[in-house]
Amino acid sequence: MLFRAVVFVLALLAAMTSSQVPEFAQQYRQRLGGAIDELARILTHFDEDAARSGYDRAGALALMARDAEQLVRDQAGRMREDIDRYSRLVEQQQAFSKSGPFGRLAAFFADFDTPLVENTMHDFEPAVPTTLEGVIFAGGGFLLAYLLLHGARLGVVGLRRRHRRRAWRYQTVNRDEDETVADRRRAEPRRDTE
């Protein structure tokens, strides 16, 4: 009885935890939009500065990469990283918008941005799942934990039974051997040592 109560409580905790996966992905998508907006602003300013100097983006980056000053070359490298990250994030946002509820989760796990995940985790606030995907994740977490814990219990019970059977067999064999030795002693004639 106690075991069932503990399993139920642990399964509920697993359900509550797994139901947060869609909520985490939702908060990640919100941060994704903010990151894209900020990177777009940075790239727009860079493109405007380059155009005022008579360069396009690629020309300005090439000029900066050849500069004698290390700081300027480093800034060119950082700007290339920002351009690449912006492209990746926009692709992921498009994958989110084209996908259904579970497709968005697949898109999240397939290609997430590590700094965004870390920042989302830092500021993550759990929420009650009210979406279909949240309810399904909660049910799946509950069922998985419940089945795993019961499976572990059955494994432990099976090992105990096997151990008990072996111990019973050992006791039976020893008892039979003791009886056989006692029967032999009774059957042997007594020898007087005089």
Image (tube, grey):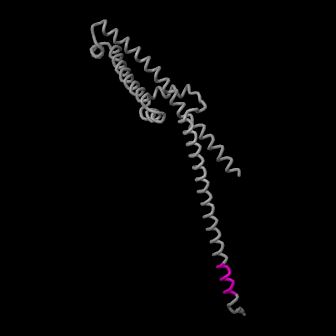
**In the rendered view, would you say 127 is above or below 140?**
above
Q: Quadrant of residue 95?
A: top left
Residue 77 horizontal/vertical position (percent): 34, 20
Q: Nearer the viewer, residue 112 or 163?
A: 112
Residue at the far top in the pictured view: 52
Q: Main secondary structure of the magenta part?
A: helix
Residue 76 horizontal/vertical position (percent): 33, 17
**In the rendered view, would you say 55 is above or below 186?**
above
Residue 149 horizontal/vertical position (percent): 60, 49
**In the rendered view, would you say 189 is above or below 131?**
below
Q: Residue at position x 55%, y 43% from top?
A: 140
Residue 39 horizontal/vertical position (percent): 41, 18
Q: How many marks?
A: 0
**In the rendered view, would you say 39 is above or below 132?**
above
**Residue 99 within the magenta-colored segment of the rendering:** no
Q: Residue at position x 64%, y 65% from top?
A: 164
Q: Residue at position x 39%, y 22% from top?
A: 86
**Residue 179 within the magenta-colored segment of the rendering:** yes
- Tell me which segment is drawn in magenta: 176-185
Q: Quadrant of residue 174?
A: bottom right
Q: Nearer the viewer, residue 165 or 97?
A: 97
Q: Nearer the viewer, residue 68 or 77?
A: 77
Q: Quadrant of the C terminus?
A: bottom right
